[in-house]
Image (cartoon, coloured by chain):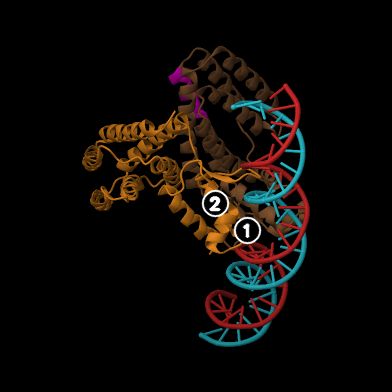
Chain colours: A orange, B brown, C cyan, D red
Amino acid sequence: MSAEKIAATLEADIVSGIFRPGEELKQGEIAARFSVSRIPVRDALQLMAARGLIDLERNRRARVIDLSPSEIDEVYHLRGLLETDCLRHAIRQLEADDLVKIEAALAHSSIDAASDRWADGDWAFHKSLYAPAKRPRELSMVEDLRRTCRIHIAGYGVLPTLTDRWLKDHEDLVAAMRSRAENRAVDILARHIADARETLLAAMPG
Amino acid sequence: MSAEKIAATLEADIVSGIFRPGEELKQGEIAARFSVSRIPVRDALQLMAARGLIDLERNRRARVIDLSPSEIDEVYHLRGLLETDCLRHAIRQLEADDLVKIEAALAHSSIDAASDRWADGDWAFHKSLYAPAKRPRELSMVEDLRRTCRIHIAGYGVLPTLTDRWLKDHEDLVAAMRSRAENRAVDILARHIADARETLLAAMPG
DNA sequence: ATCCTCCGAAATGTATACATTTATACATTT
DNA sequence: AAATGTATAAATGTATACATTTCGGAGGAT
């Protein structure tokens, strides 16, 4: 079991809420769990820190990130900025087969909407929206920000309330994209993200 | 010598152009240079990878990042998006003592403009502009993007041509901030960043 | 009761030794 | 001459052992 696989397994545990924000991860326990020495575990922890899943300080135990409401607020602000920018440029470069993939992702995410995999489907859908912009670095930054949100959503046990509205937003987004209505699509997306922000902040203490 | 210090020293070498884009970093050589084993060197390399200085692949040597012109283009686009956003929010929350610090940073950066520390002074100045926005995460992302640019600027031996214009932009930015002219300040900054983009791209092959 | 101080247990950091994978040079073939 | 295959050298990955630092509770002073 190599560092990458250990990191991937632990990441799944964190975004699914098994490890919650602020929880400590001990090198020795992880090493025992995967039957390896602490060396590859240390590598795995550094990889996870690079992806923003945990905080690492020298000589201190690793901790799952635990953001304050104001930090969460900044993350959602950045998501609004970057995701609407991706969407704008996606619409400007949209081609026919892009829409086919978007429709497929929409259908897939609708099926998963009520299951515990809703977050995976949601990201796959949004990723398909942003893909035509061809901005790999920007997309990767969005992915990091969304992962940060997801860790807290899972950790605080937030269930998507308003699933109906959430699904309708997705459908409206696709409709706006099909008619190249850039500003309308951006407005829908901005409110969509603002709604998600409210839902998480409402569940957070402090 | 701990991982953090090794990483800091190597970072200084990379942003100063001693190690150039694409150059390989071998664990053994670094370990010998700092008189430590390869374990803390591996930690240092992971830290550097997290900050975007090098690329790390399993079983392969670490390499200083080496972006294509189109990737550089995306980085400057992101800088424009994030830095203008920081500037807007800074102006909206600007207070008297913020301007004092900005003036000081401007004076300092003007002194360093002709020396080989011009990039440090430039970042210190821009950081003082964005600080009033109180967006630590956004500022950190800007810092990462700027570091990426700086590695290539140093590696390709780009000297700031147009230093006069560059300094005038800084003065104009401060003037615009003092009069809370949000749109004017954003326009100056956007062109300022676009100029930097052109200067680097012109020096890059391909 | 609350706050220090100190000490032992436990966790992290590092060196060494060895295993595994990659890279370089050279021979062989087309 | 270019391309392919192979062996040797060199680099990276990991386990173990030990050094260093932190954490948590016992004990005493306020």
Determine crowd level at label 2: few under 14, some 14-19, many 20+ residues with C-alpha closer than 10 A: many
Q: Position of residue A48 (x, y in %)?
A: 52, 50
Report, in whole angstroms, how far the alpha carbon at label 2 lies from the one at label 1: 13 Å
Q: Nearer the viewer's eye, disc 2 or disc 1?
A: 1
SS type, badge 1: helix
- Foreground residue, B159 or B133? B133
Q: Position of residue A94 (x, y in %)?
A: 29, 46
* Residue B145 image label: none
State left or right for residue B82 relative to residue B26: left
Residue drawn at (60%, 40%), measured in percent from left and top?
B150
Q: Position of residue A145 (x, y in %)?
A: 44, 41
Q: Please name the amino acid that badge 2 sits on.
A: Leu
The span shown in magenta is B182-192
Residue A66 belongs to magenta span: no
Determine crowd level at label 1: few under 14, some 14-19, many 20+ residues with C-alpha closer than 10 A: few
Same-chain status of marks 2 and 1: yes
- Circle 2 chain: A
Disc 2 marks which residue? A47
Residue drawn at (25%, 37%), measured in percent from left and top?
A162
- Circle 1 chain: A
From this view, report whether residue B110 is shown above or below residue D19: above
